[in-house]
Amino acid sequence: MSRTWTKKKLIEAAINGMLTSLDPHSSYLAADAFDDMRVQTRGEFGGLGIEVTQEEGFVKVVSPIDGTPAAEAGVQAGDYITHVDGESVLGLTLDQAVDKMRGPVGSEIVITIARQGTEEPFDVSIVRDTIKLTAARGRLEGHTVVLRVTTFNDQTYDNMADALKKAVDEAGGKDKVNGFVLDLRNNPGGLLTQAISVSDAFLDKGEIVSTRGRNPEDSERFNAEPGDLADGKPMVVLINGGSASASEIVTGALQDHRRAIVVGTKSFGKGSVQTVIPLRGEGAMRLTTARYYTPSGRSIQSLGISPDIVVEQPAPKPADAKPEEEGSAASKTRSEADLRGAITNDTMSEDEKRVWEEEQTKAEEAAKLREEDYQLAYAIDILKGLSAIAHSDVAGQ
């Protein structure tokens, strides 16, 4: 099928070819793509809900965004998209491949995915939708505040601060909270300014991040100001291979200052800075201009952030998996209460029984969370342990 090339299209293609040959993140943004990028930073846009990059000619998923069509369809960080509606993406620029995935809200698209550990590529059908992002949500898990940050747009800090306050109020105040989990898994990043604000939210002083360009005079350092939204309470940051860019800045800052324990798996490793330069008339040029460095001087680029404690997330059970068969009576766990003629505990007061029942309920809820999200349950267990140690130290004084 022939394609009509206008002078404008030829110029745009030439500019884009020059820029994309530099690195995976430099490119030319046509007017519509430039508009889309600005809309995305405001937190609402149309599409599938995936952050992508390019690797070995194919489109690689950095991470699916929570609650979007791609996430609900089972797209995972690290997946390779090889075809869109049956057409190979090999040979296309990243922007061209992304254009193929765009379309009217409500329309269907079929993407072909190659996944590590799966022998054959497979098709996934997704219905495009308007992606409305709540950049941060909070909830209370027992006595732990869990802050889930999905992206770094211009709403992130405000969303997170509001979510933190509501969860703390629900707990009955910070003295009732044993710690905070900052969940940055599958967060593809976003605005540098918001990464700095989120880091600063939990740091009283010190460097957050530095950027270094080709020329020494282009270097910048960003420092924390007094004030900690968590009042020094213990923190755990959760990351995985889908945590990139701004997520890695926050993680590196909190890790280097020993403000948080980092749990999960190694992050993506995007440690470069892109500057968007609007061009006269229409469009813009996105150019890699510097690298990020953590407070200790580590470059994130291609290396990522290594967790303090590596915790893999078990693969989810298939939807058609059969429930495990119950073992024989001999293999079941038995306790004193199961013995014939066991003496019952009739010394417990009503208050003691209520406390015991509450503890049993909490234990059951914790066990359920381990089944649903092992990494998060692990993080919460760390904070429980730190809280217990802190209380024992106070009691021993």
Image (spheres, helix red, strand yellow):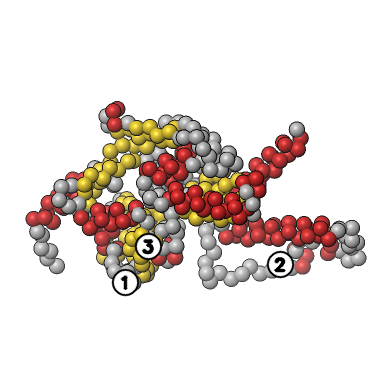
Q: In this view, does 287 lie above or below 71?
A: above
Residue of label 1? 107
> Image quarter for residue 345?
bottom right
Lateral position of residue 93 relative to residue 45, left or right: left
**Residue 159 locus on image (x, y percent):** 46, 52
Residue sitting nearer the eye, 329 or 261: 261
Residue 246 occupies quadrant: top left
Please give left or right for residue 93 compared with residue 386 in the image.
left
Q: Are marks 2 and 3 in contact (CB under 8 Å)?
A: no
Q: Mark 3 points at which residue?
A: 131
Quadrant location, the C terminus: top right
Mark number displayed over residue 327:
2
The amino acid type, in three-letter code, at marker 2 is Gly
Q: Which of marks 1 and 2 is nearer the N terminus?
A: 1
Q: Where residue 280 appears, x then y in whole percent?
A: 15, 47
Label 3 sits on what residue type? Ile
Within 10 Å of disc 2 (Cα), the crowding (few <14, some 14-19, many 20+) is few
Q: Which of marks 2 and 3 is in front?
A: 3
Q: Can residue 368 be seen in this view?
A: yes
Residue sitting at x 24%, y 48%: 27
Residue 198 image offset from top left, x and y in percent: 46, 44
When asked about the image quadrant of residue 325, the answer is: bottom right
Return the disc, 1 or 3, that comes first in the chain's sequence: 1
